[in-house]
Every structure is written in structure tokens, then in C-alpha cells.
Image: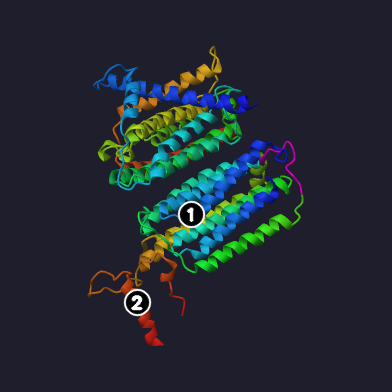
């Protein structure tokens, strides 16, 4: 019983976490090469060498940081990514924890990510990390609302807050077609959650690395893995919520999930390489003035469609 | 985990919260005390729902209402802090003595 | 998890750990030097209570605690930094008044409520098997108790309007701080603000009227 309910799910989440983070690193390097950035070494080996190099480096110390919070923040961000991977189903029965409110749990992962990233920036007791943390709170408070409305829209046709039911409700028509506004808005949320590419406000280069600017050595490795793992968890949830999860012809369910996750990951990484970074104030204006009303519209659309069906 | 232990935990949270609400000088810390008391109240409500309410849904609804009360308390508290700070540059309860004499 | 009466030993262990976490972090809120740390200790206490609610089969309420409190405590931490001295906790901090009375009241509250928990006879009516807590809550909120639920929504809306009125800088009759600023130290100078000397002078002023 313990093996079935505790060890196997844990193992599944850990394997997805590590393999997924590695794939993100490789994919991002491939994209960088395609966009003409100089490529250092072998694409497949480079993430591993960088990881090994970070492990042997000295962990930087600032003056009087909040040690506990500073060291815990990367680990907590990784744990949040693991929670995301734990609630996404691989098939109708293969899911680490089939909580009946898993959609809401993912919403709280998004909210807690704001706390953790702010803590990461605040606890280093340094100027640029603190600015990064504040910027992230502004971004986080903006995207959480958008994400809530989009996720409620997904839960409506399923008449359930459970991701497995959400997938089951897409048997006839995937949500990406049923609610055309949902997936684009949700992808923006994903870029915000992992502060990737155009929404990289917290760890941006204009802040010399933002919340991570004072972090080196093993904590930096954990932080980088956590960001990549969060991207994987997000792509898993996006697959489940909008792309029909395990549904699809010919292939077995889990393979379909992997294919769709890779597609979402490629789109996110492509957007990250392709779009320029937004200025923080413009980003917040865009979120509240344009995207939030659009998410209202998406919810009204979802409700109307659910009634009509 | 029995009803008695759950209620004891709720009582401990309410006690700590009461201490905080009465002893803290700064407005925001005082609000934290109130929140901790509401935390205990919500736990007690859910415990009663699970152990002696026979699953009546109104028990869960009570917790939702307490959450709404909490949000209202927080926003009103922050608005008052902002208004008082604008007016008197004060952030502690002692500095408000306008209605005392 | 529908029968919470016949739970296993794992649930009991989890409950003891979570209860200890909730109480200790709740106590640390008022014993830490940093305001930001205090608000996140409070968040930890809420999360522990939310997890206990999930153990009690209230799956929606427990998870709702996580996201409600995550956002609330982030905002609270920011307010802390805005309004407090010493947000980082680099210096020791202890801003309390009437501490003995407060400690006494806290202990008295715990003893009275704890005695009620131990000695009162509550009916023993556990959750019926086959109850779907989330569905029953949803049906209650948008069914029999819709009026209560919607009133809560209206009250929240009224709160939002009231908060904007209270905290916005300008109203119809000018700035919010109009007439309540202390006079300047020099004619046309900056407002005096609140410093130690001002407080003393204000106290002395009241005594003159005596």
C-alpha cells in the first residue's frame, strides 16, 4: 500500500522533474542556436557540464542575509513545481495524486510562487535582488487573476475541479477550440510564472540577474532547475487543461501527453527567444487593461458555450 | 485527530492571536493577531462540520463567509492605515489619541 | 477519505506535525524581528491549518486557504515594508504595549476555550459515507444559501469602493490629507511630521489646557 500510494507517485514526479528540466535546457540551447546565438560546446552535454560546474562553485554570501529564507526559496520553488507535476494526469488512471480540487491547487501553486520568488529577492539583503522581488510581486498579482478566470472557464464544461475530469470533458472537442481565448492567455500566465522571455522581470539582465544576481554555486543550480521544472509543470497543466491531455488516436495516453507537453514547451521557449522583454510598468498596464478584460470575456464565452452544450 | 484535539489547536491559535491583537503597537501587526484568531475560528468550524455536523454543507459555507470577513478586515485595515498615515504620519496605535479626551 | 472517523495512523502523525507547525509559526509571528518574516510565518500557520482541513475531507476549503492566504500575506508583507521601520529585521524589534495584560488575556482565552473543547459534550455525527464535500458546498452556495453568498459578494464590492474612497489621495473637496497635516516648522515649510520632540510638545500642550 505504501509502495503504491507513496513511493511510486513520488518516483514518477521526481523522474519527470529531472528529465523535464534537462529537456528544457537542451531545447532552449537548440533554439538559441537556431536564432544565431553562439553555441558553446555540445548541446546535449552543455546543461550537464554547467550543472556540474555550478555544484563545484562556492556559494556566494551577502552581508547579513536572511539565511533560512534565502536557502529555502529555491527549494520551495522546486517543491511548487513538483506539486504541479503531481496533479497533472498522464492517463485516466496514471496520476500521482488525483485530488478532487486539483485545479484550485494549481491556482494556489501560482499564488505561492509569488511568495517564494519575492522571498528569494528579499532575503538576499541586496539592492538588485530586492528590486527583482518587487517587480515580480507586481507581475504576480497581475497574472494570478487572469489565470483564475481562465481556469474557472476550463472547469465549467467539466463540472468539476479535478484535472482528470477536465480531460474527460474534452472527449468531443478540445478546450483549445472550445475556448479559443483560453490557451493564449494561459501561455502568457506561464511565461509570467516562470518569468521567462518577454516577462522575465524578476531575473532580467537589466538588473544584472535580478533575484538571482547574488546567488552562485549549488543554490544557483537549484534555482535554475526549479525554473525549468516549473516550465515543465506549467506545460503539463496547459496540456491537461486545453489540449486534451491523454486523448488522441493511435498512441497510448502518456505518449500523447509527452508529445503535447513538448509542443507547449517549444512554443514557450520560442516565444522566450523571439519576443523582447517588456518594461515592468508597461507589462502591468497591459495585464490589467487588456488581458484581464480579455480573461473576463474568455470566462463569459466558456459559460455561454457550457450552457449551449 | 479527534474533535477535542482539533478544538484545542483552534483554542491555542485564538489565544496567540488574542495576545497579538492586544499587545502589538503597530497597526499591521495588530491585524495579524486578528487574522490568527480567525484562523482558529475557521479550523473550529471545519472540525465541527466534520465531526458533529453530519456533513451539513452550511458548515463549510460558514468557513467561506469567515474567509470573506477576513478579506474585508484586511482591506479595510490597510485603507485605514493608509489614511491615518497620510494624515498623521503615524503607524502605531498610540499616536492616535484624537478621540481620547 | 470520506470516512474521517476511521483514519489511519498516517493521518494522526500528519495532524500532530501540522498542529505543531501551526502553533509554533503562529507564535513566531509576534516573536520575530522582521515584519516580512512575521507575515510569512503567519502564512505558514495558515497553510498548516489548510492542510489539516484537507485531512478533515474539506478539500475545497483547505486548498482555498492556500491561495487566499498566499495573496493576502504577500500584500501584507509589502505593507509592512511600506509602513514599518526595520522591515528586514536587522535590528532587534519589540513594539508592544500592555504586554502582561495581553499575555494574561491570551492564556485565559486558551484555557476557557480549551476547557470547552475538553469538557463540553458535542454530538457525535460524523460525515456520512459517500458525501462529496466539494459538490455539496457548491450546491449549498448557489442553492439554499445563495442569498448569504451573494450578500458576501455585495459586501466585498462595498468594501472595495469604501477602501478606494478611504485611501485615494483626492476626493471632491481636495486631498485626503487636507487640514490634517501638522503645520510646518517654518512658514510654508514641510509638515513637521511625527518625531519624538513633537510628541513631547503635544503632551505638554494638553496639560496647559488643564
Q: Are marks 2 and 1 in contact (CB under 8 Å)?
A: no
Residue C19 place in picture, x, y as percent? 59, 47
Residue A292 place in picture, x, y as percent? 43, 42
Other residues around mark 2 within 10 Å, as few (<14) / some (14–19) / many (≥20): few
Which subunit holds the residue at mark 1?
C
Give the residue pinned by disc 1: C29
* Foreground residue among C188 and A212: A212
* Colour style of the rendered protein structure: rainbow
Marks 2 and 1, how far apart in space? 31 Å
Residue C194: quarter of image: bottom left
* Foreground residue among C198 and A191: C198
Give the total number of marks visible in the rendering.
2
Give the residue pinned by disc 2: C200
Q: Residue at x 25, y 69 (%)?
A: C190
Taking the image as shown, residue A96 lies to the left or right of residue C79, namely: right
Residue C134: quarter of image: top right
Range of magenta residues: C124-133
What is the chief secondary structure element of the magenta stretch?
A: loop
Q: Residue at x 73, y 49 (%)?
A: B52
Secondary structure at numbered mark 1: loop
Secondary structure at numbered mark 2: helix
Other residues around mark 1 within 10 Å, as few (<14) / some (14–19) / many (≥20): many
Q: Residue at x 66, y 57 (%)?
A: C114
Q: Is residue A224 magenta?
A: no
Q: Is residue A258 shown to the viewer in this render?
A: yes
Which subunit holds the residue at mark 2?
C
* Foreground residue among A174 and A196: A196
Respond whether the residues carrying marks 2 and 1 are from the same subunit. Answer: yes
Taking the image as shown, residue C6 lies to the left or right of residue A111, namely: right
Q: Residue furthest top?
A: A250
Q: Which mark is residue A177?
A: none
Amino acid at each position: 500500500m505504501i509502495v503504491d500510494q507513496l513511493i511510486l507517485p513520488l518516483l514518477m514526479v521526481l523522474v519527470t522533474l529531472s528529465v523535464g528540466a534537462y529537456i528544457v535546457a537542451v531545447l532552449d540551447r537548440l533554439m538559441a542556436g537556431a536564432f544565431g546565438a553562439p553555441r558553446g560546446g555540445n548541446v546535449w552535454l552543455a546543461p550537464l557540464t554547467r550543472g556540474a560546474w555550478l555544484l563545484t562553485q562556492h556559494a556566494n554570501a551577502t552581508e547579513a542575509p536572511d539565511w533560512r529564507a534565502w536557502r529555502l526559496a529555491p527549494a520551495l520553488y522546486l517543491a511548487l513545481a513538483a506539486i504541479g507535476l503531481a496533479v497533472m494526469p498522464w492517463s485516466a488512471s496514471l496520476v500521482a495524486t488525483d485530488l478532487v480540487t486539483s485545479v484550485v491547487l494549481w491556482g494556489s501553486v501560482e499564488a505561492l510562487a509569488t511568495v517564494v520568488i519575492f522571498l528569494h529577492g528579499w532575503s538576499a539583503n541586496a539592492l538588485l535582488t530586492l528590486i527583482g522581488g518587487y517587480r515580480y510581486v507586481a507581475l504576480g498579482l497581475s497574472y494570478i487573476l487572469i489565470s483564475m478566470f481562465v481556469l474557472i472557464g476550463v472547469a465549467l464544461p467539466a463540472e468539476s475541479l479535478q484535472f482528470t475530469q477536465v480531460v474527460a470533458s474534452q472527449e468531443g472537442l478540445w478546450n483549445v477550440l472550445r475556448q479559443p481565448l483560453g490557451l493564449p492567455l494561459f501561455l502568457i500566465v506561464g511565461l509570467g510564472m516562470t518569468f521567462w522571455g518577454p516577462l522575465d522581470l524578476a531575473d532580467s539582465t537589466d538588473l544584472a540577474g535580478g533575484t538571482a544576481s547574488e546567488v552562485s554555486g549549488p543554490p544557483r543550480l537549484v534555482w535554475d532547475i526549479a525554473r525549468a521544472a516549473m516550465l515543465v509543470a506549467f506545460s503539463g497543466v496547459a496540456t491537461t487543461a486545453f489540449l486534451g491531455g491523454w486523448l488522441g488516436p493511435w498512441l497510448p495516453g502518456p505518449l500523447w501527453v509527452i508529445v503535447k507537453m513538448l509542443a507547449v514547451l517549444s512554443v514557450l521557449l520560442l516565444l522566450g527567444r523571439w519576443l523582447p522583454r517588456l518594461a515592468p510598468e508597461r507589462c502591468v498596464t497591459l495585464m490589467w487593461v487588456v488581458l484581464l478584460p480579455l480573461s473576463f470575456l474568455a470566462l463569459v464565452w466558456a459559460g455561454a458555450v457550457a450552457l449551449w452544450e | 485527530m479527534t474533535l477535542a484535539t482539533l478544538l484545542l489547536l483552534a483554542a491555542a491559535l485564538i489565544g496567540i492571536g488574542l495576545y497579538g491583537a492586544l499587545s502589538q503597537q503597530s497597526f499591521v501587526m495588530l491585524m495579524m493577531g486578528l487574522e490568527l484568531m480567525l484562523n482558529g475560528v475557521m479550523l473550529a468550524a471545519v472540525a465541527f462540520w466534520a465531526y458533529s455536523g453530519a456533513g451539513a454543507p452550511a458548515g463549510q459555507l460558514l468557513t467561506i463567509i469567515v474567509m470573506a470577513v477576513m478579506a474585508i478586515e484586511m482591506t479595510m485595515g490597510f485603507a485605514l492605515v493608509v489614511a491615518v498615515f497620510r494624515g498623521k504620519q503615524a503607524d502605531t496605535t498610540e499616536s492616535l489619541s484624537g478621540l481620547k479626551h | 477519505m470520506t470516512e474521517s472517523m476511521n483514519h489511519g495512523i498516517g493521518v494522526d502523525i500528519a495532524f500532530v506535525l501540522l498542529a505543531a507547525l501551526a502553533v509554533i509559526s503562529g507564535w513566531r509571528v509576534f516573536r520575530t524581528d522582521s515584519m516580512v518574516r512575521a507575515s510569512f510565518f503567519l502564512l505558514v500557520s495558515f497553510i498548516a491549518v489548510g492542510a489539516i482541513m484537507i485531512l478533515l475531507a474539506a478539500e475545497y476549503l483547505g486548498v482555498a486557504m492556500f491561495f487566499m492566504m498566499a495573496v493576502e500575506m504577500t500584500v501584507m508583507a509589502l505593507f509592512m515594508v511600506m509602513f514599518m521601520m526595520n522591515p528586514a529585521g536587522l535590528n532587534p524589534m519589540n513594539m508592544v504595549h500592555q504586554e502582561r495584560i495581553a499575555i494574561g488575556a491570551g492564556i485565559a482565552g486558551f484555557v476557557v476555550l480549551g476547557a470547552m473543547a475538553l469538557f463540553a459534550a458535542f454530538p457525535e455525527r460524523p460525515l456520512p459515507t459517500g458525501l462529496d464535500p466539494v459538490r455539496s458546498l457548491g450546491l449549498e452556495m448557489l442553492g439554499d444559501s445563495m442569498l448569504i453568498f451573494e450578500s458576501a459578494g455585495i459586501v466585498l464590492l462595498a468594501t472595495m469602493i469604501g477602501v478606494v474612497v478611504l485611501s485615494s489621495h483626492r476626493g471632491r473637496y481636495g486631498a485626503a490629507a487636507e487640514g490634517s497635516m501638522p503645520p510646518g516648522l517654518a512658514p510654508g515649510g514641510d509638515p513637521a511630521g511625527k518625531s519624538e520632540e513633537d510628541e513631547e510638545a503635544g503632551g505638554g500642550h494638553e496639560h496647559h489646557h488643564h
